[in-house]
Image (cartoon, coloured by chain):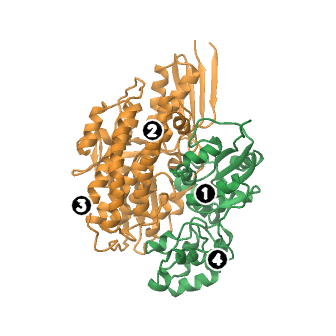
């Protein structure tokens, strides 16, 4: 009987910290069984061997910040049957999207002695602004169990079981006392998508929204509550402008306080 | 005289995006450029205006492989600016979480990124096909490092529990007990790892390096100490910028570092081991000697053994900390901002990571300067390549390319950090 051909997997990197693709290698218990099911055809961080596309599944990490990458992401799309973006950089532009609110020329001269050597765009944008994306996995970094679920679902041609509700749901599920209600600790859990497992509140810390905005977040009400806890407009701007600063609900809310 | 150009698109098994250009003419390397084209992300620029307490969370995002290093350098720099010294159990917990990052990062590099070079494989998956038990050992070792970071930090990548002044929550003695049992297995696995890699075939290549590392009177360095070098430098970390200079070169989005006298230098496991051999745990020192590694060691290919030795040391140190641990009264000490400048320099798995911040009394960051280990090693890696290629011109292009990539990986370059990545391009003009 002919052996079934394994689906070809590619991992692409754009502007990022490499942490989300590292999450694949961090699946220490599952790594060997996952690679038993797929043909790892392009994954430069882990292998020198490169097989040509097309690929059945592509995982894309990082945001678009250079003219060259604007073209390269088109190639990634053309070479991929299914394309999944992983992490806050790929889904929202990442922390490097803070440049979108400022003058990038000034940024370049602040870091580099010879600005003429630096080629960069004035913005850092999510992958979905450039191509059609089949699924977006959130997080800074992504959660590896969610990653395994997305890979599993994709290989088995079903929709990934990823919730879009808030971090509050995860706190309730794990029985964590609300840090905002009980201790007055500012927490972005109510407007942030679940997926991390509500780690911060379980460490007596408010959520800082590294999984980005939940579905239909009420950021205006969130801001009112944060103001009750003593935050000023400038604090609110910083609070919404972190790893998912350019995600629309957070962008708009931060702009509302910048006026 | 035929000339030849070789292109290898993008160096693999490094963290980030880079390329190497080599030009060879009349048996001499006329140009060796390690090009880092990972796009710039401008951390030092957007840190200005942020609150000083945000630095550990923001700078962690420079690197998914060594976020603890960024968190540690930034919190120490901020505390230095505010005149606070974190002591006792909190200081020990910071060393403990760093042990976790060293174990995780070193196991990743030894097993998944570097060993394939020595064994003639493209990746760890091929090793797993032929020697599954070895790879399973590496994966479990790596996992234990990650578990330690997760226990103290909340998660392995971009941990959430580190703050200026200490932690948000500290573990009870009982919570540390299970990982202690795992670490006992890990230290055995680290010993086996050292024996395994010591049996690899190492290219005959020795260079005169100036090694630079932290040195602390009482311990193998993680977070504190003076900066010392194999040529006699001994300075407090606040004098770093007076002794080391960053230069912006056209072929790289990473700034190159030199010593003030123009010389290149090397930081990382080989530098630490050469300069702090007497501070290793007794069993790590013994294992190093048995593996034939004792100072002065100048063969960069043997850095894979040094990573093994440091993995064992990190297991021993973690076990010591867990044994002696008593929880601190508070999870963090209070740090109030004031006008001033603070310096932090800690030992990331791949070498010294320097941070300097100017802040004001409202706690706003006015200026930030970050010098990662890879940008410090970059100039010396280029020199290594030049010398290595000139010595090995007889090799076929394919073999030479392989060994150049292996040579670069000796330094575990983290290009995401340094971008400020690798494509191999060898132009040969020879008889």
| Of B64 and A193, the residue lying toward us | A193
Q: Nearer the viewer, mark 2 or mark 3?
A: 2
Would you say residue B260 is visible in this rendering? no
Per the image, the residue denoted by label 3 is B324
Q: Residue at x 40, y 33 (%)?
A: B197
> Label 3 marks which chain's residue?
B
Q: Chain of mark 2?
A: B
Q: CA distance from mark 1 to mark 3?
A: 38 Å
Q: Residues within 10 Å of mark 2 (few under 14, many from 20)?
A: some
Q: Is residue A18 above or below residue B75?
A: above
Q: State how far apart marks 1 and 4 are (Cα).
A: 29 Å
Q: Which residue is mark 2?
A: B134
Q: Are marks 1 and 2 on the same chain?
A: no
> What is the x, y in percent for residue B399?
54, 23
Between disc 1 and disc 2, the foreground one is 2
Closer to the camera: disc 4 or disc 3? 3
User: Does A126 sit left or right of B142 as displayed?
Assistant: right
Q: Spatial distance from mark 1 to mark 2, Cα to Cα?
A: 26 Å
Specify the subunit that label 1 lies on.
Answer: A
Compare residues B123 and A172 and report the one nearer the observer.
A172
| Residue A134: image location, x then y, percent | 74, 57
User: In the displayed structure, would residue B41 be above or below residue A240?
Assistant: above
Q: Residues within 10 Å of mark 3 (few under 14, many from 20)?
A: few
> Which chain does green denote in the image?
A
Mark pair 4, 2: CA separation? 51 Å
- Looking at this view, name the residue that lies furthest to the front: A1
State which chain is coloured orange: B
Residue denoted by label 1? A147
Name the residue at 29% across, 69% down. B327
Mark 4 — residue?
A: A253
The answer to which of B142 and B217 lies nearer the viewer is B142
Question: What residue occupies the far bottom of the structure in this picture?
Answer: A228
């Amino acid at each position: 009987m002919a052996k079934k051909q394994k689906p070809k997997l590619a991992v692409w990197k754009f502007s990022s910290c490499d942490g989300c693709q590292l999450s694949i290698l961090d699946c220490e218990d599952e790594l060997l069984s996952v690679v038993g099911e797929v043909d790892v055809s392009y994954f430069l961080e882990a292998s020198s061997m490169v097989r040509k596309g097309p690929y059945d599944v592509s995982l894309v990490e990082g945001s678009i910040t250079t003219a060259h990458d604007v073209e390269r992401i088109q190639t990634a799309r053309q070479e991929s049957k299914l394309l999944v973006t992983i992490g806050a950089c790929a889904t929202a532009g990442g922390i490097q999207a803070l440049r979108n609110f400022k003058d990038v020329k000034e940024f370049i001269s602040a870091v580099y002695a010879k600005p003429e050597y630096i080629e960069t765009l004035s913005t850092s944008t999510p992958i979905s602004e450039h191509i059609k994306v089949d699924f977006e996995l959130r997080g800074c970094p992504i959660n590896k169990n969610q990653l395994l679920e997305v890979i599993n679902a994709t290989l088995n041609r079903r929709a990934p079981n990823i919730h879009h509700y808030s971090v509050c749901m995860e706190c309730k599920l794990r029985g964590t006392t609300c840090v905002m209600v009980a201790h007055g600790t500012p927490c972005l859990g109510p407007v942030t998508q679940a997926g991390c497992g509500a780690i911060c509140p379980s460490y007596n810390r408010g959520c800082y929204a590294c999984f980005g905005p939940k579905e239909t977040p009420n950021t205006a009400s969130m801001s009112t509550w944060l103001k009750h806890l003593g935050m000023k407009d400038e604090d609110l701007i910083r609070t919404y402008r972190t790893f998912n600063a350019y995600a629309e609900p957070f962008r708009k809310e931060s702009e509302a306080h910048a006026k | 005289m035929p000339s030849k150009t070789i292109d290898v698109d993008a160096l693999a098994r490094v963290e980030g995006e880079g390329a190497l250009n080599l030009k060879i003419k009349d048996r001499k390397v006329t140009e060796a450029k390690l090009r880092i084209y990972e796009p710039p992300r401008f951390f030092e620029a957007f840190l200005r205006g942020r609150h000083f307490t945000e630095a550990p969370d923001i700078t962690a995002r420079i690197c998914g492989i060594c976020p603890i290093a960024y968190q540690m350098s930034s919190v120490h720099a901020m505390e230095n600016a505010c005149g606070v010294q974190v002591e006792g159990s909190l200081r020990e917990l910071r060393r403990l979480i760093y042990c976790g990052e060293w174990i995780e990062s070193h196991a990743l590099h030894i097993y998944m990124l570097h060993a394939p070079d020595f064994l003639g494989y493209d990746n760890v998956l091929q090793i797993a096909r032929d020697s599954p038990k070895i790879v399973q050992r590496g994966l479990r070792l790596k996992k234990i490092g990650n578990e330690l970071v997760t226990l103290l930090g909340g998660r392995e990548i971009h941990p959430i529990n580190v703050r200026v002044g200490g932690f948000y929550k500290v573990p009870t003695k009982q919570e540390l007990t299970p990982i202690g049992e795992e670490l006992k297995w890990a230290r055995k696995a680290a010993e086996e790892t050292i024996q395994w890699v010591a049996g690899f075939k190492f290219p005959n290549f020795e260079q005169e390096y100036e090694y630079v590392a932290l040195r602390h009177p009482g311990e193998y360095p993680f977070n504190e100490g003076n900066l010392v070098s194999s040529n006699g430098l001994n300075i407090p970390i606040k004098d770093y910028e007076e002794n080391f200079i960053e230069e912006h070169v056209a072929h790289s989005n990473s700034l190159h570092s030199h010593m003030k006298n123009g010389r290149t230098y090397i930081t990382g496991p080989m530098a630490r081991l050469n300069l702090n051999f007497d501070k290793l745990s007794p069993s790590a020192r013994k294992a190093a000697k048995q593996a034939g590694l004792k100072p002065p060691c100048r063969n960069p290919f043997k850095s894979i053994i040094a990573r093994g030795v440091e993995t064992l040391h990190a297991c021993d140190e973690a076990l010591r900390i867990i044994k002696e641990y008593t929880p601190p009264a508070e999870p963090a000490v209070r740090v109030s901002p004031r006008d001033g400048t603070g310096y932090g320099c800690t030992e990331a798995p791949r070498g010294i990571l320097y941070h300097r911040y100017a802040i004001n009394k409202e706690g706003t960051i006015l200026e930030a300067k970050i010098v990662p280990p890879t940008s410090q090693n970059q100039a010396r890696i280029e020199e290594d390549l030049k010398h290595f290629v000139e010595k090995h011109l007889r090799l076929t292009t394919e073999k030479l390319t392989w060994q150049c990539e292996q040579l670069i990986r000796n330094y575990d370059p983290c290009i995401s950090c340094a971008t400020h990545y690798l494509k191999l391009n060898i132009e040969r003009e020879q008889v």
